[in-house]
Each structure stands twice: as C-alpha cells, then as structure tokens.
Amino acid sequence: MDYKKIEEASRRRKRITKAVTYVFLTIWAFMVLFPFYWMVLTSVKSYGSYNSEYIPKFYTTSPTMQNYSDAFTAVPLAKYFGNTLIFTLITTAIMLVVVVLAAFAFARLNFKGKDLLFAGFLSLMMIPNELVIITNFVTITNLGLRNTFTGLILPSVTSVFYIYLLKENFEQIPDELYKAAKVDGTSDFKYLTRVMIPICQPTIVTIVILKVIECWNSYVWPRLITDDSAYFLVSNGIQEIRENGFGRENIPAMMAAVVVISVPLIIIFLIFHKKIMAGVSRGGTKG
C-alpha cells in the first residue's frame, strides 16, 4: 500500500473541500451584503436620476448627499431618534432587571411548582406574536396608555427567551459556590450581584445588545400604539417620509434615512459581535 499516494489524495480532498467552502461563503456573503450595498447606493442617487432608471444601475457617476438632508428636513427625524433612544434605554434597563431576577429564581431558588411554572412559562414562546400584540393593544388601550412612553415600553420589558438563556447560564455555576456563600451568611441578592452576574457577564452583555437591536428596529408595535408624532420612533419616521415627507414616494430619501438609522446598530454589532457569539454559545452549553 502506497501511503504517500493516500496522504496526497487526502490533502487534495482537503484543498478541494476548502476551496468549495470558500466559494460558497463568498457567494453567501455577497447575497447577504448586497441589500446593504443597494441601500447605500440608492441613498446617494438623486431623485431624478433614480426615477429615470428604467433598468436599475449598480453604480452612480454623480453621487449626492442631498437625500440625507431631505430625510431630516422632511420629517423631524432627529426628534424620532431621541424618542427611540429613550424607548431603547428604559426598556432595556427594566428588561434586564426582570430577566436577571427571574432567571436567578428559576436557576437557584427552590419553591413548590418551580418546574411546572417554568414549563408553562416556556410554553408562552409557542403563542403567535400576532395574538400577543392584539392582547397587548387591548390592554394598553383600556389602561389609557396609548400615545405614551409607558404604553410603548410595558409590553417589551420581559422576554421568555432571554430568561431561558440566562437561566441555563446560571445553572452552569457550581452549586458548591452557592452553598459556600450561604454558609458564610451571604444573602441571595448579594450572591447574585457579586458572583453570578460577573461570571455570566458575556451572556448578559449579549442579552443587552440583542434587546437594544430589537428595540431600535421595533416597527409593528410603535405603529400600532402611537398616532401622535410626539411619540414616534425612527421606524415611524421612515414610514412618514414615504407617506407624507414630500407628497410623493421619495425612495432615495427613505434609503438615506434607513442608512442613518442602521449605522448605530452596525457599529454596536461590529464592536460586540464576539461577545454575542460567546454569550449565545455559552448559554447553550451544559457542564
């Protein structure tokens, strides 16, 4: 048996496999990034140039930044940015407190019916979002909280998935640490803040980032619960540009607004993408 030929054939198969993998990843990256490229390209085309293209062009010879100016003058987009920032920060802060305390209770505290309660809690993930939105809308309306930040924030201050993710992460911490802390007279709250939260920081950071992205991109609920422009978010602003901004459908200005709105999220993801991947993978690993 010629071991050299077998080894050479094995190396050849590995090279071919690697080449095919890189080709596939390159094609996939192009498919994923092309919509963003098209968004940026459209945002720097003039209104006349865009509408005169019977066949879409994948480049422009006369880019303009006028659309970015139009996006901020057609509607009070800067105010909507401020509203979105308030909504995102408050919602994320309250959600983090709720998620951390709930995950700790399910992971470390012992009480009757805990497993049954958690199973029922997880079953909530099976309820279609449309049904939840309808129920939330009726509840918020009956409470007289439409067109308020409270009405915007309340339905988003908890998440079954985030509680489950953090609970799994908390359960990876050895029970011996908890028992030793209790022997030393450490309270549950002190053990949570001094031991569990620092150890599970990657997962908590991941939850915060994902919630920020979720709030920033929120569209259906803000459109449903607010019709007062004083409480509009950036998602409302994009739709307002389309409907009322110029008395016509100005796609380049809309794309400029979307680019501006997307930049903070892209920066956050590029900075923290390793923590997101580490937190998600850590939360799904036992032992």
Image (spheres, grey):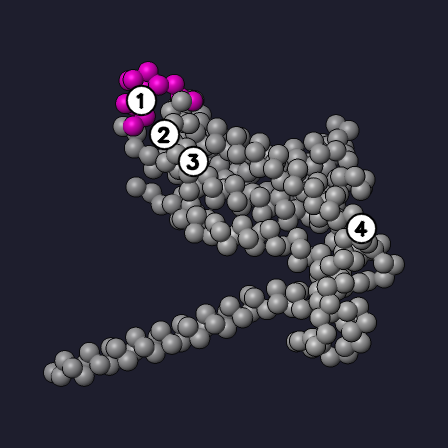
Mark 2 or mark 1: which comes first in sequence? 1
State the residue position of label 3: 167
- The residue furthest top is 185
The amino acid beneath tag 2 is Val
Near mark 2 (Cα within 10 A), the count class, few <14, some 14-19 or many ≥20, is: some
Q: Quadrant location of the N terminus?
A: bottom left
**Rendered position, 48 above or below 137:** below
Mark 2 → mark 3, Cα distance in angstroms:
14 Å
User: Mark 3: which secondary structure?
Assistant: helix
The amino acid beneath tag 3 is Lys
User: Mark 2: which secondary structure?
Assistant: helix
**Rendered position, 209 above or below 67:** above
The amino acid beneath tag 4 is Val
**Rendered position, 129 above or below 108:** below
Mark 4 → mark 3, Cα distance in angstroms:
43 Å
Residue at (74% x, 53% y) in the render: 238
| Magenta residue span | 177-189
Which one is in front, 188 or 208?
Answer: 208
Q: How many marks?
A: 4
